[in-house]
Amino acid sequence: MQAAIVYEKLKDMTSLVRLYVEGHHWDEAFNIVKNETKFKDEVYLPYATWLVENDRFNEAQEALIKGGRQHEALNILRRLAENAITENRFSDASYYHWLLAKSCLDAANKISGGKDSEMRQLISAFKSYYRSAEVYHIYHSIQRFTDQPFTYRHPEALFNMALFLTHLDTKPSKKYRGVSKVAVLYTLAKQGKALGAYKLARHAYEQLQALTIPQRFQESIDLGSVTIRSKPYQDKEDLLPLCYRCSATNPLLKSHGNCCINCKQPFVLSFVSFEVLPVVEFFLQDDISDDEAVRLIKSGGPVHKKADDWKESNTGGTQVLTLESIANTNIDDSIDPFTNKLLEFEEGGDFVPVKVDREILKCLPKNEVIIKRWGHRTGNQYYKVLLSEVPITLCKECQQMFHTDDYEMHSLTKKCCPFCRTPVGTN
């Protein structure tokens, strides 16, 4: 390009950048931006527009963020999310809502002091987008079950997913566009009946009778509503969730949502099978910072090992083989201060969070504490694993928890996190 050579000799970088942008020579334009950051707007904004025109929306959003156009980047993600919902691509809708949540969280963590109102708005938006991402992630499997002949989800997982969305509907909350209550209740009824949750299935069928049913579901729902009455009015005991805080057995459907009916402790679910994980969230005393808490946990109690050893002995000429557990042999659970904190609640009363002090933090085994790190503006969330023999994996990008077996199985097939799609090698 003769014009480019002339502009370079004249050191007219403004004209040179415009020339590269008009000719869509993006690599050359980016090379100039590396040394002359003042041209960011003149390169990244036209580049993002060009990407949108070529249906490369994800790349356009990334280009706008690099160019410092956060607001425009969020607008693109919102449009992508809305289009995905309209087209019933709920997995993509979940992913775009996760990206929106992540963008809001990153922006909140970058805000300097004195902008509390803006920070609160961003954190509120983050929580809203994150919940939407969870809902659409779950509803993707529900929609595939109701609309397609085959699904890779196990019946137990579909049942747990439908139950999660049903509990979400018991609390005052916003409505999620594209999420069909009929599809959720139909899945709950059908899978509940198959698994032996007859009482819950009957409740779901009764709820369906009060809704406008699409014609394709009508015959199946009418038949199910009749046949479910031949079943006992109870749910199988092995389906009832156990609260790991107070050891109370809970009914499947709870009026207070996805928490224990006795101590009100919220349940934490594995985001593949949606089974209840054996973890309890705990909170720090007001005068303990996140940095101090992490330091105390790292330097705190002994690591609980879980191993069994066969010991051979020879007594009176007789060989004896004994299985000895070497797990926690020197630890007396009866004086565990964290366990004592778990029991500080009023049965049937309001939720009383588990609050720990410095002494308790020092006693916690490092391998039994899970920390969700959201950034300095939102702070950390802390969880204690109550069954150390149940391995749990935390995605460091989206902070979702999974049964390790579930996470590894998905990673083998998809090579990424089940929720946020972060490649396994970078997580």
Image: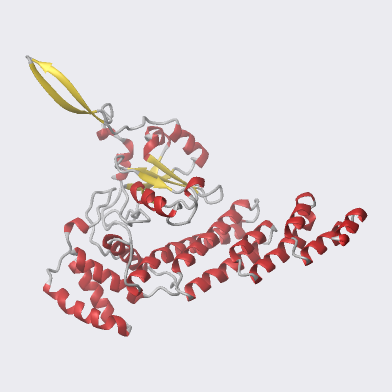
Residue 224: x and y, percent?
20, 77
Residue 418: x and y, percent?
42, 56
Query: 277 above or below 89?
Result: above
Extreme residue in the right direction:
10
Extreme residue in the front direction:
1
Asked where in the image residue 340 lies, by quadrant, the reply is: top left
**Horizontal side of residue 191 vs 99, given as left or right:** left
- For the point 38% across and 37% down, the residue is 367
- Whether residue 353 is visible here, answered yes or no, is no
Residue 389: x and y, percent?
29, 40
Asked where in the image residue 57 lies, by quadrant, the reply is: bottom right
Extreme residue in the top direction:
316
Q: Nearer the viewer, residue 321 or 199?
A: 321
- Whether residue 158 is visible here, answered yes or no, is yes
Colouring rule applied to residues: secondary structure
**Horizontal side of residue 186 vs 79, given as left or right:** left
Residue 86: x and y, percent?
48, 76
Q: Nearer the viewer, residue 27 or 303?
A: 27
- For the point 48% across and 75% down, the residue is 87
